[in-house]
Image (spheres, rainbow, N blue to C red):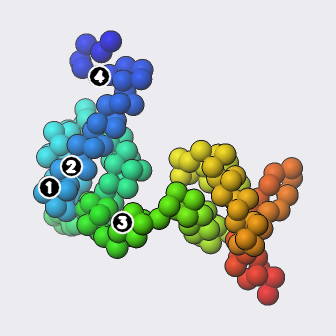
Amino acid sequence: MSHPRGRPQNGHRAAAGVADGNRIAGIVMVKGPLTTRALRRESGMAGKRHRYRFMRALIEAESQYLIAKSGISHEGISRYSYLWESFEGLFPETIRQSKALGIETAGAEIVTQYLKTVIAGTARQIAVIFTLNRAFVEFVVERLAEDGKVIRQIEDDEEYILSRETDLLLRS
């Protein structure tokens, strides 16, 4: 059931966020790079009453790698606005390469690149951050450990995963 003002309730809110995110991504793909202000106007979500709906839509579109911030546009003396562009427009080579990866290879790449950035993490953290199934992350970590690409270490009853490269740097 909908709210009298048309706001979705319960599970419908999540579906509306996905639809709004897809709509925003579609606008950017068709019109090209847009400032936040222009994107709000184009999407019909300008004005204070749509602020949180628009923010949820941006988060949804970003989390699905549909759009990304590509810069800052200065509008007026003290006003600036982010510039949004399609992810594919910004990173065409990354998109092309990702299409050729199998699921296990992509998972291994995500885990190893993440560990190079943060030094150490848990399977649970990686699963949450990248919205992956925890069992899949644990499977990938097991394979990476077997191949000697990551190290598993227990600290305070929690298993941490480190990239082999990071471990070597820390030891030198």
Q: Which residue is more in the foreground, 115 or 80?
A: 115
Q: Is residue 100 left or right of residue 117?
A: left
Q: Residues within 10 Å of mark 4 (few under 14, many from 20)?
A: few
Q: Which residue is more in the foreground, 53 or 126?
A: 126
Q: Is residue 137 above or below residue 120?
A: above
Q: Earlier in the sequence, mark 4 or mark 1?
A: 4
Q: Which image quarter: residue 54?
A: top left
Q: Residue at x 55, y 64 (%)?
A: 105
Q: Residues within 10 Å of mark 1 (few under 14, many from 20)?
A: few
Q: Is residue 46 left or right of residue 171?
A: left
* Label 4, label 1: how far apart the Cα atoms are: 27 Å
- Find numbered disc 3 in the image and state the secondary structure of the residue it sits on: helix
**Residue 27 in the image, given as x and y percentages of width and height:** 17, 50
Q: Earlier in the sequence, mark 1 or mark 3?
A: 1
Residue 7 numbered mark, or none:
4
**Residue 146 in the image, given as x and y percentages of width and height:** 76, 66
Q: Which residue is more in the foreground, 38 or 127?
A: 127
Q: Earlier in the sequence, mark 2 or mark 4?
A: 4
* Label 1, label 3: how far apart the Cα atoms are: 18 Å
Of circles 4 and 3, the one toward us is 3
Of circles 1 and 3, the one toward us is 3
- Find numbered disc 1 in the image and state the secondary structure of the residue it sits on: helix
**Residue 70 in the image, given as x and y percentages of width and height:** 30, 67
Q: Residues within 10 Å of mark 2 (few under 14, many from 20)?
A: some
Look at mark 1 in the image and give the residue it sits on: 30
Q: Are marks 1 and 2 in contact (CB under 8 Å)?
A: yes
| Badge 2 amino acid | Gly
- Find numbered disc 2 in the image and state the secondary structure of the residue it sits on: helix
Q: Are marks 3 and 2 in contact (CB under 8 Å)?
A: no
Q: Are marks 4 and 1 in contact (CB under 8 Å)?
A: no
Q: Earlier in the sequence, mark 3 or mark 2?
A: 2
Look at mark 3 in the image and give the residue it sits on: 95
